[in-house]
C-alpha cells in the first residue's frame, strides 16, 4: 500500500524538530552524553523514513534525485502549498 | 554554503484566506524584529566571534531563522490565496496589493521595506550576543501580539510553534553568553584580545 505523503512528511518533520533542537542544545552542551545518544538514535530512525518518502514522493534534497528516468527535482508541489501540509 | 530541503520546518495548512491577518503577520517577514532580521543578524555576526562554540551556534540558529522566514511566508501566502477584488478592498489589503499583488515582499505591516538598519554586527561578542538575546525577546513579543489578534486555529498553531523557538534560541544565546565568556573569562579575554588586536576593558 502506498504510504500517505503528509503522514510521512510529518514523521520527518517530527524527527527534524527533535534533531535540530538537540543540535542547538549540543552546541552549548557538547559534553552531554544523553543528548548525543538521543541525537544518534533519532538520526538513524529518520534515515528510514526519509528513504521511504523519497522513494514514493521524490527528493527532499537535489542530491536525492533519481537520475535514471527524468530530472524531477524542480517538480512541485512546493512546501508552501497547502496540499502538501 | 546552504542546501535547500523541499519541506517546511513545521506544517502550515490554512483553510480560510484572511488578508488582514496576513498583513499583521508580514511583521515577521519585513519588520524590525522579523525572522529576516534575525537570520541576517546572526549570519553576519558569526564571522568575528572569538570562539568556535559561538560561531557554530550563530550559524545553526541563523540557519533555522531562514526556515522560519519560509514558514511565515507560507502563512502569508496561504492567507492571501484566491482573493476577490471585493475581499482585497474589504480587508484593507489594497495598499499592499497595488504594489505587490499577492507576492511576498519583505516590508512591515505599515509598508516600510526591510532594512539592515534593524540590526547591528558590532564585531564584539558581548555586545552582539546581548543584542541577540534582546532580538529573541522582541520577536517573541511580536508573536504574542500576533496571537492576541489571531482567531483562526490554522494560523495560531504554526505561530505558537514559531514563538516557542524564540524562547529556545534565547535560552541557547544565554548559555553562549555565559559559558565561554564568563566561566573561562580570563581565557576568553586572552583569546579575544589576541584575535581582535585591540583593547577591550
Image (cartoon, rainbow, N blue to C red):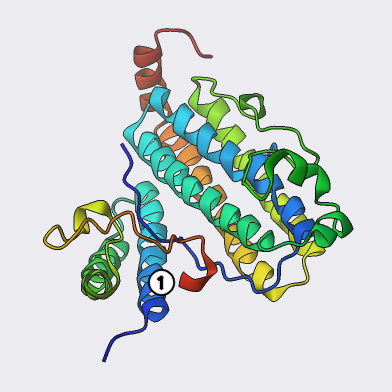
Q: Position of residue A25 (x, y in %)?
A: 40, 55
Q: Quadrant of residue B189?
A: top left
Among all residues in the image, which is located at the extreme bottom? A1
What residue is rendered at 51% in x and 39% in y? B39
Front in this rendered view, residue A12 or B126: A12
Q: Position of residue B116 (x, y in %)?
A: 61, 26
**Residue B163 visible to the viewer:** no
Q: Which residue is mark 1?
A: A14
Among all residues in the image, which is located at the extreme right? B90
What residue is rendered at 39% in x and 8% in y? B197
Relative placement, left or right, of B103 versus A54 is right
Relative placement, left or right, of B99 versus B4 is right
Relative placement, left or right, of B182 versus B117 is left
Figure check: A52 above or below B71: below
**How would you rate the neighbour count of disc 1 (Cα within 10 Å): few for under 14, some for 14-19, many for 20 or more?**
some
Q: Position of residue B74 (x, y in %)?
A: 57, 58
Q: Quadrant of residue A68?
A: bottom left
Front in this rendered view, residue B171 or B63: B63
State the SS at label 1.
helix
Front in this rendered view, residue A29 or A61: A61
Q: Which chain letter matches label 1?
A: A
Figure check: A45 above or below A67: below
Q: Quadrant of the N terminus of chain A?
A: bottom left
**Residue B18 visible to the viewer:** yes
Among all residues in the image, which is located at the extreme front? B85
Circle count: 1
Q: Position of residue B65 (x, y in %)?
A: 50, 47
Front in this rendered view, residue B1 or A68: A68
Relative placement, left or right, of B16 versus B4 is right
Amino acid at each position: 500500500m502506498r504510504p500517505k505523503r503528509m503522514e510521512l512528511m510529518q514523521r520527518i518533520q517530527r524527527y527534524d524538530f527533535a534533531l535540530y533542537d538537540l543540535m542547538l542544545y549540543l552546541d552549548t552542551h557538547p559534553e552531554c552524553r544523553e543528548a548525543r545518544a538521543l541525537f544518534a538514535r533519532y538520526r538513524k530512525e529518520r534515515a528510514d523514513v526519509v528513504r521511504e518518502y523519497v522513494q514514493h514522493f521524490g527528493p527532499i534534497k537535489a542530491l536525492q534525485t533519481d537520475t535514471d528516468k527524468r530530472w524531477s527535482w524542480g517538480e512541485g508541489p512546493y512546501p508552501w502549498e497547502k496540499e502538501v501540509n | 554554503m546552504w542546501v535547500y530541503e523541499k519541506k517546511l520546518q513545521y506544517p502550515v495548512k490554512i483553510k480560510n484566506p484572511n488578508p488582514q491577518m496576513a498583513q499583521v503577520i508580514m511583521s515577521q517577514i519585513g519588520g524590525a524584529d522579523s525572522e529576516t532580521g534575525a537570520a541576517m543578524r546572526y549570519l553576519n555576526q558569526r564571522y568575528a566571534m572569538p570562539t568556535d562554540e559561538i560561531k557554530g551556534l550563530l550559524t545553526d540558529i541563523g540557519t533555522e531563522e531562514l526556515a522560519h522566514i519560509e514558514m511565515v511566508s507560507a502563512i502569508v501566502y496561504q492567507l492571501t490565496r484566491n482573493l476577490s477584488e471585493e475581499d482585497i478592498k474589504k480587508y484593507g489589503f489594497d495598499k499592499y496589493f497595488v504594489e505587490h499583488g499577492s507576492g511576498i515582499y519583505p516590508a512591515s505591516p505599515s509598508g516600510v521595506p526591510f532594512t539592515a538598519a534593524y540590526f547591528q554586527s558590532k564585531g564584539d561578542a558581548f555586545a552582539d550576543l546581548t543584542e541577540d538575546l534582546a532580538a529573541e525577546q522582541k520577536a517573541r513579543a511580536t508573536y504574542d501580539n500576533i496571537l492576541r489578534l489571531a482567531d483562526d486555529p490554522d494560523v495560531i498553531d504554526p505561530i505558537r510553534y514559531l514563538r516557542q523557538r524564540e524562547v529556545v534560541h534565547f535560552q541557547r544565546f544565554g548559555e553562549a553568553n555565559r559559558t565561554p565568556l564568563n566561566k573561562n573569562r580570563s581565557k576568553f579575554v586572552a583569546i579575544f584580545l589576541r584575535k581582535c588586536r585591540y583593547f577591550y576593558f
